[in-house]
Image (cartoon, rainbow, N blue to C red):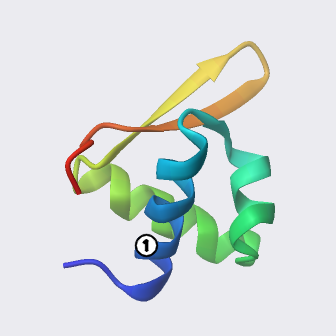
Amino acid sequence: ILNTREKLILDKMKETGKVKMSHLRKLVEIPKASFSRHIQELEKKKLIIRLCEGKNKFVQLIAKGF
């Protein structure tokens, strides 16, 4: 079960695809600590995956059919 902020994050990710975490946080306008917590929850629910490319941190949807 997803809360409102998690749904917002997933909706933005559907629009952007693979996105830098810092950019996504600005798009959804959620405080940094809360955003990190929601990202962890979405990762635990196996809906997203975190990727590191050098110093850049990205998130990407796993489940496309939502």
Residue 42's quadrant in the figure?
bottom left
Few, some or many residues within 10 Å of mark 1 (<14, 14–19, 20+): some
Residue 3 relative to residue 65: left or right: right
Where residue 10 appears, x then y in whole percent?
44, 60
Where residue 58 appears, x then y in whole percent?
62, 33
Q: Can you say which quadrant of the picture contains the N terminus?
A: bottom left
The residue at the point 78 percent across, 49 percent down is 22
* In this view, 1 is above or below 40: below
* In this view, 20 is above or below 46: above
Q: Nearer the viewer, residue 44 or 7?
A: 7
The residue at the point 20 percent across, 48 percent down is 65
Q: Can you say which quadrant of the picture contains the C terminus?
A: bottom left
Q: Nearer the viewer, residue 25 or 27?
A: 27
Where residue 14 appears, x then y in whole percent?
47, 50
Residue ID for mark 1: 6
Instruction: Give, as a three-letter code, the residue at label 1.
Output: Glu
> Secondary structure under badge 1?
helix
* Badge count: 1
Where residue 50 appears, x then y in whole percent?
49, 35
The residue at the point 50 percent across, 80 percent down is 5
Residue 51 relative to residue 63: left or right: right
